[in-house]
Image: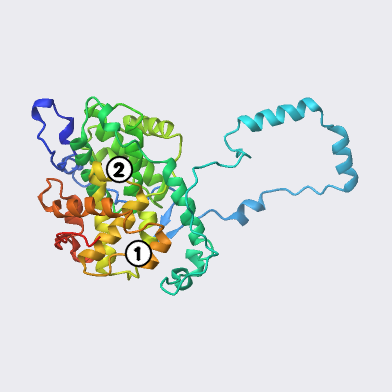
Amino acid sequence: MSIQIFQDCENIVPGGQAFGRKNKRAEDNKSAKGIPKPTKRVALGNISNQIHGTTRVQPSRAAKDKHKTVQHVTKQDQFKIHEDKPKSSRDTQRRHSSLKDSPMVLSLTPCITDSFEEIDTDDLISCDVQDIDRHTDISYDVPEYAQDIHNYLKKAELKFLPKSNYMDKQVDINKTMRTVLVDWLVEVAEEYKLIPQTLYLTVNYIDRFLSCMSVLRGKLQLVGTACMLVASKFEEIYPPEVAEFVYITDDTYSAKQVLRMESLVLKTLQFDLSVPTCRDFLNRYLLAAGAAKESQLRYLSQYLAELTLISTEIYLSYRPSMIAASSVLVANCTLELQPWTPTLQYYSGYTIKELAECANDIRRFFHSASTLQQQAVQQKYKAPKFGCVSQLNPPDELPL
């Protein structure tokens, strides 16, 4: 795939266009007579180990243990070993110094983050607030720690926010180019059937990287490709191979360039890859809103939250938790439900007044979504499996 923003300045169309796709490999895969054509690797296919059918073959631990020789050591031999190798102070210092420089050793000092008003899980829930953790699956949702995890994520999101004005310091790229890039990444995520969290992490990595590095327009798509490669390796079970990411860029970049950019992204982000995204908060707020698994409220909230990814103003101006809460608020108003319930206020920690500005920005962007040149998110949620929520009419105003 080629990207519009990498052409010369005279050929750039304001607003950008979606990336084209060339069927280049159809001609390259022509084989000789009598020789079968090589099959193209399906997305999320064979990455590592061998796969037979749908069963993943794992090495047998018992087979490895057969070749291990067990040596029986008596108590007297143990004393002799300790006597033969006395521990000197020099050996102890050398060991501590090596452990100190090792990247595998965790710091003993606690992580200090900015404090905020936490929701006390021991407080008695009033009659107007429903206990959402009581009805969750104990095996997967850990209801005993759910609110504590939410409190931690609200602390951690402050640490991994990109700079809201980083685009002003970029010399060769602008907000329109970022919008075109994110719109193309939405198509790539749909093409390879990546989970939504991978897309959210990719956009977070891109904005944090651009907050620290100045990038030429000819390398912007390379940055987005490398960030999605990192996010796929971190989040997916079977991430696409490097060759697949080279292919989706229409061979604009080589595999060596993608891997070099991947290394630069990791160093710039200081390997902080596990960051809270809007998707982490949205699932819990939908649970507090009483949204069913397959309901318009759930699909519309997901659509509004994903739509903010292509909006530089909204995505960089508000926290992920506030965007998630505001998306649920706008979705409730669109479906003519109660805008904000005591249960939502209790579990999110936001009042309706605190969400007013962000919710109004999302409503206005929702209203103008059909007129944008970038339509990847709108086409995605136009499908019947998402309830065709992108075709719903937004409210004229929010009852705030």
Residue 247 vs residue 20: left or right? right
Could you say which disc has been placed on residue 286 in the image? 1
User: What residue lies at 26% left-to-right and 45% top-to-bottom?
Assistant: 314
Neighbour class for label 2 at 10 Å: few (<14), some, many (≥20)?
Answer: some
Residue 188 relative to residue 18: left or right: right
x then y, percent, for residue 243 = 31, 39
Outermost residue on the right side: it is 76
Is residue 43 among what the camera can see?
Answer: yes
* Disc 2, SS: helix
Q: Position of residue 353 (x, y in %)?
A: 31, 56
Residue located 28% across and 27% down the image: 169
> Could you tell whether 84 is left or right of 10 in the image?
right
Element at label 1: helix
Label 2 with label 1: CB-CB less than 8 Å: no
Tell me the crowding category of disc 1: few under 14, some 14 to 19, or many 20 or more residues within 10 angstroms, Cα based.
many
List the residue tagged with mark 2.
Answer: 317
Above or below residue 141? Residue 74 is above
> As rendered, which of 168 and 23 lies closer to the eye?
168
Measured along the vertical axis of the image, is residue 276 above or below residue 337? above
User: Mark 2 or mark 1, which has the lower sequence index?
Assistant: 1
**What residue do we see at 22% from left, 26% from top?**
172
Q: Quadrant of residue 93?
A: top right
- In which quadrant of the rendered view does residue 173 lie? top left
Residue 45 visible, this angle? no
User: Residue flagged by tag 2: what amino acid is it?
Assistant: Ser
Q: Label 1 is placed on what type of residue?
A: Leu
In the image, what residue occupies the spot 82% across and 28% down?
Answer: 88
Q: In which quarter of the image is residue 28?
A: top left
Task: Pick the residue in front: 124 or 107.
Answer: 124
| Above/below status of 117 relative to 244 | below
> Separation of disc 2 and disc 1 at Cα?
22 Å
Q: Which mark is residue 114?
A: none
